[in-house]
Image (spheres, rainbow, N blue to C red):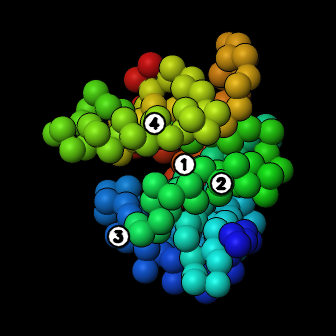
Amino acid sequence: MMKYKEASLSEIEEIYITHMKNDFPPAELKPLEAIKYSVSMGWYRMYLAYDEGGVKGYACVADCTEGFGFLDYYAIVKDYRGTGVGTEFFRKLKDMTDFSCIILETESVESSKNQEEEFIRKRRIAFYERSGCVNTGCMYNVFGVEYNVFINNDIELTPDFLAKLLSAYEYAYAAILRRDDKDYIRRIK
């Protein structure tokens, strides 16, 4: 039976070394010390899906402004992908946080370098859409990588809501990276 919990700092370090370094390209992986600092400040959490056999998945969520959360990393351990663990964990994640809305991003299909990358990106987008996420139609370039911005709720995307959402999205990056400049993030559409 699957269980869920918030990870301790030692568990975060273990997950980072054991899984995150393999699950995410180096260009997308924040330094462990930045993640640990954010956790120690109380505005970043890692949640785990696990059973008696060990960790099956993990999710890193940052606190933003206006009641938004930012899903910074989400992955299922390789041997458990495609088994339903990810869908169940994603649904449970909504209940484990107190955010009114969780912002997430996916690499744009348009900027794929090859067919394999395009397939993976389309598969990831399809997973989030099946899980009830909505593409906001907004796109950002962050450190040279193009991302589509999604939310986990089907909320009316009014101009006021989008302004708050995008402000929270940009805030999450600035807080996690501890940067005041904005030269690494640019809205495309």
Q: Earlier in the sequence, mark 4 or mark 1?
A: 4
Task: Please name the residue that numbered disc 2 is placed on.
Answer: 88
Q: Earlier in the sequence, mark 1 or mark 2?
A: 2
Instruction: Give residue 189's position: percent from left, percent from top.
Output: 44, 19
Q: Identify the element where label 2 is drawn.
A: helix
Q: Identify the element where label 3 is drawn.
A: helix
Using the image, determine if residue 146 lies above or below residue 85.
above
Task: Please name the residue that numbered disc 1 is placed on.
Answer: 173
What is the distance, in whole Å, between disc 4 and disc 2 at their CAs?
17 Å
Instruction: Give residue 135's position: percent from left, percent from top.
Output: 54, 26
Which one is in front, 89 or 38?
A: 89
Which one is in front, 185 or 17?
A: 17
Q: Earlier in the sequence, mark 2 or mark 3?
A: 3
Q: Quadrant of the N terminus?
A: bottom right
What is the three-letter code of the residue carrying label 1? Tyr
Q: Earlier in the sequence, mark 3 or mark 4?
A: 3
Which one is in front, 181 or 96?
A: 96
What is the distance, in whole Å, between disc 2 and disc 3 at their CAs?
22 Å
How many circles with numbers are drawn on the protein? 4
What is the distance, in whole Å, between disc 1 and disc 3 at their CAs?
22 Å
Q: Is residue 150 left or right of residue 161?
A: left
**Label 4 neighbour load within 10 Å: few <14, some 14-19, many 20+:** many
Q: Identify the element where label 4 is drawn.
A: helix
- Residue drawn at the location 63% of the way across and 47% of the way down: 70
Task: Please name the residue that numbered disc 4 is placed on.
Answer: 125
Which mark is nearer the camera, 1 or 3? 3
Considering every residue shown, the one lying at the far right of the view is: 98
Which mark is nearer the camera, 3 or 4? 4
- Residue drawn at the location 68% of the way across and 80% of the way down: 8
Q: Is residue 152 visible?
A: yes
Which mark is nearer the camera, 2 or 3? 2
